[in-house]
Amino acid sequence: MITTTNLLQMKKSGQKITMLTAYDYSVASILDEAKVDVLLVGDSLGMVMLGYKDTLPVTMDEMVHHTKAVVRACNHALIVADMPFLSYKVDIRDAVYNAGRLIKEGGAQGVKVEGGAEIVDVVTAIIKADIPVMGHIGLTPQAIHQMGGYKVQGKDSKAAQKIFYDAQCLADTGVFAIVMECIPWKLAEEITHTLPNTPTIGIGAGTHCDGQVLVTHDLLGLYNRKIPKFVRKYADLTSVITIAVENFSKDVREQKFPALQESFE
C-alpha cells in the first residue's frame, strides 16, 4: 500500500505521482486495481454525487460516509479525505476532532485542507495529533465567493509571491504534500523545485509538479458540466451509458429482454 512517505520517495526519484478522486466503492475498486497512487475523497462529491452547485454545503457526516465506502474498496492507494467548509477554520479543537473523524471513522490515511499561511496553526495542531495533512493552495474552491469565481490565481507578482509564501509555510508545518490548483506553470515549477521535501500535486498547474490530480468524473466524461481547460477527457462514458440504457429500454419495450437464456425453467 502507498504511504505518505512513499510520495516523498517518488518525488526524490523523479517518479510522477498519480491522484484521482473517488467517492464510492465501485469506482474506487477500479481505480485501486489500476494502481492509482492516491485517491482523494474530495468535497467535490457535493457537486458530482449530491448535485450541489458547489462544495460549500458538504458536511462532515457526508465526508465520513463516502470515505468509508472508498476505504473498503482499496488495498493499494493512499486514501486522503477532504475536510469540508467550516470544519477546520473556525476552531482549532474542532479542526483536530473533525480530522480525527475522517481517520478514525472514515478510515482515511490523511486529510486535505485548503489555505496557506492563515491556517498554519490549524495544520500544525492536526499534525501534532498524528494525522497526516495534505495542503491545497492557489484556487481553493471553498473560498470561491471570496475569490470571485473559478479563476487562475497568482498571475501578477504580488499574488504569485503570496502563493509561494503559502507553500513555504505549509511545507514548514510538515504537510506530506501540497495540491496546487489553477496557477501559472512557471510558479508551480518554482515551488516544486524550492520544496525538496514536499511533493506537489498539480491540477491546472503545468507539467513540472511532482504529480497530477483530476476529478475522475471529468476524466471519464461522467459529469455534465463545463469542463475546465486543465482537464483532458480520456473517455466519454456519458455517451456509452446513454446508448446502453437506450438499448435496454428498446429491448424491454420490444420484448427482446429478458430472452430465454436470461430466464429460469
Image (cartoon, rainbow, N blue to C red):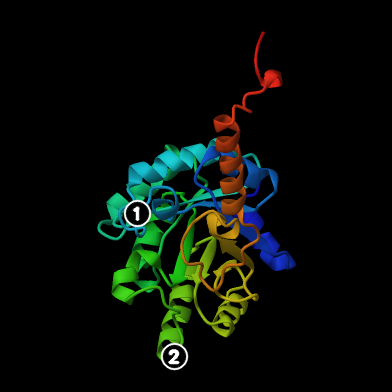
Q: Are marks 2 and 1 in contact (CB under 8 Å)?
A: no
Disc number for residue 52: 1
Q: Position of residue 151 (x, y in %)?
A: 42, 77
Query: How many C-alpha atoms fall within 10 Å of the one at disc 1: few (<14), some, or many (≥20)?
Result: some
Screen quadrant of the C terminus = top right
Can see residue 187? yes
- Image position, residue 45 (x, y; %): 43, 51
What's the amino acid at mark 1? Answer: Tyr
Q: Which residue is mark 2?
A: 156
Q: Is residue 43 visible?
A: no
- Please name the residue shown 70% across and 48% down the image: 34
Q: Quadrant of the N terminus?
A: top right
Q: What amino acid is labelled 2 in the image?
A: Asp
The residue positioned 59% from the left and 59% from the top of the image is: 219
Residue, far front: 254
In the rendered image, the residue lying farthest to the bottom is: 157
Which callout, 2 or 1, points to the residue nearer the camera? 1
Give percent across and percent down for residue 59. Answer: 32, 48
